[in-house]
Each structure stands twice: as structure tokens, then as C-alpha cells.
Image (tube, helix red, strand yellow):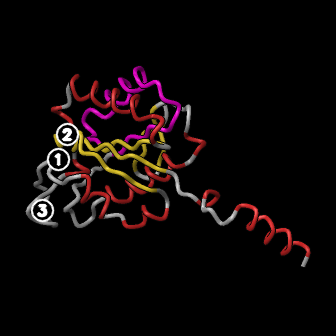
Amino acid sequence: MEFFKKTALAALVMGFSGAALALPNITILATGGTIAGGGDSATKSNYTAGKVGVENLVNAVPQLKDIANVKGEQVVNIGSQDMNDNVWLTLAKKINTDCDKTDGFVITHGTDTMEETAYFLDLTVKCDKPVVMVGAMRPSTSMSADGPFNLYNAVVTAADKASANRGVLVVMNDTVLDG
């Protein structure tokens, strides 16, 4: 009974403001790639990278709302073979500018040049919040799309305070990689 009284008192002191239960804010910066790829058939392997927008990627994983307040922004929607310095600079500037406005970043990206982008961002981002890159091996329209699961894990990683100050992380296939 004493424990209950202390717990109830603590809840009253906090005023049920929700601050103690607030979800982290995570910004998803979408750049395209296979994770955003779309094809004409769920059973065929032909697809176009960067065909699906960030809103559809987020909506494909309704469980994200239980982990974080997610805000998506479409930076570009290209295959990563078309990644270039301008996109890298845009991403770095966006993260550095918005660092104080969010609790972490997830960047959806194609796998062809993901390591180059991660390296560039690791050198140029001056933000202590988690920065997590994520991609997929199968397009979003595939019957066995891996992007939704990878995106879920990337948001979980970005929402975890233990991911801060670790440089740019890559999350795919149930694995977290760091520099």
C-alpha cells in the first residue's frame, strides 16, 4: 500500500503532463533507393528505385507511432547510383540546421552508395543526436519487402538515446553498424 501511495503521489506531482511519457521526435529524411522502389508486380523483380514517397513508407509501418512522433521529409527520390554532392550537402545542412528541433534522424537511402553517404555525413554533421541510415534489398512493392522492418528498426535505433554521439549508424537486416 505504501508503494501505491508513493507512486500515486509521484503521478500527481508530475501532473500527468505527459512529459514523462512523451515519445521522442524522429525526422525521416527520404532520398529514394530500393526501400522506396516500386514495381508493377509483387512477384516480379523489375522495379524503379525512388518511386514511393516518404509518406507511403511511413504509412506502411503503423507501429512507428508507438515508438516516436515521426515527421517525414522528401529530400530527393532517386536511385542511389544518382546520389551526388548536392544531395550530400543538402542532407548535412538539414541535419545540422534541424539538430535542436528533433531527437534523431533516419535517412532512407539506396544501398549502392549508402556507405559513401554515411562517410560524408559522419565527417560533416555536427549534431550529437542519432543519425541512422536505412535501406532495403527488395522494393516496397515486393511480396517480401524488407524495407518496413528495416525502417522500424531504424526508428527504434534513432529513438534510443544510446545511439547519440556514435556517428552515423546503418541499420539493415536486424543489424546496427557503426563506423
- Whether label 1 touches label 3, CB < 8 Å: no
Specify the amino acid type for callout 1. Answer: Gly
Q: Earlier in the sequence, mark 1 or mark 3?
A: 3
Q: CA distance from mark 1 to mark 3?
A: 17 Å
**In the figure, 71 relative to 91: above or below?**
below
Q: Earlier in the sequence, mark 3 or mark 2?
A: 3
Question: Measured from the top left, where is residue 81 in percent x and y?
Answer: 17, 33
Please tell me whether residue 88 belongs to the stretch shown in magenta: no
At numbered mark 3, what does the secondary structure look like: helix, strand or loop?
loop
Q: Which numbered marker is on residue 76?
A: 2
Please tell me whether residue 127 belongs to the stretch shown in magenta: yes
Q: 110 or 86: nearer the eye?
A: 86
Q: 64 or 166: nearer the eye?
A: 64
The span shown in magenta is: 109-134
Question: Measured from the top left, where is residue 52 in percent x and y?
Answer: 18, 54
Specify the amino acid type for callout 3. Answer: Lys
Discs 1/3, front? 1
Q: Please name the residue that numbered disc 1 is placed on.
A: 50
Q: Earlier in the sequence, mark 1 or mark 2?
A: 1
Q: CA distance from mark 3 to mark 2?
A: 25 Å
Specify the amino acid type for callout 2. Answer: Val
Q: Please name the residue that numbered disc 3 is placed on.
A: 44
Question: Residue at left 60%, top 42%?
Answer: 162
Asked if one can make out residue 67 in the rendered structure from this viewpoint, the answer is: yes
Mark 2: few, some, or many residues within 10 Å (few <14, many ≥20)?
A: some
Question: Measured from the top left, where is residue 92 in percent x and y?
Answer: 35, 27
**Which image quadrant: the N terminus?**
bottom right
**In the figure, 76 relative to 148: above or below?**
above
Mark 1: few, some, or many residues within 10 Å (few <14, many ≥20)?
A: many
Asked if one can make out residue 179 in the rendered structure from this viewpoint, the answer is: no
Q: Is residue 3 left or right of residue 32?
A: right
Quarter residue 3 falls in: bottom right
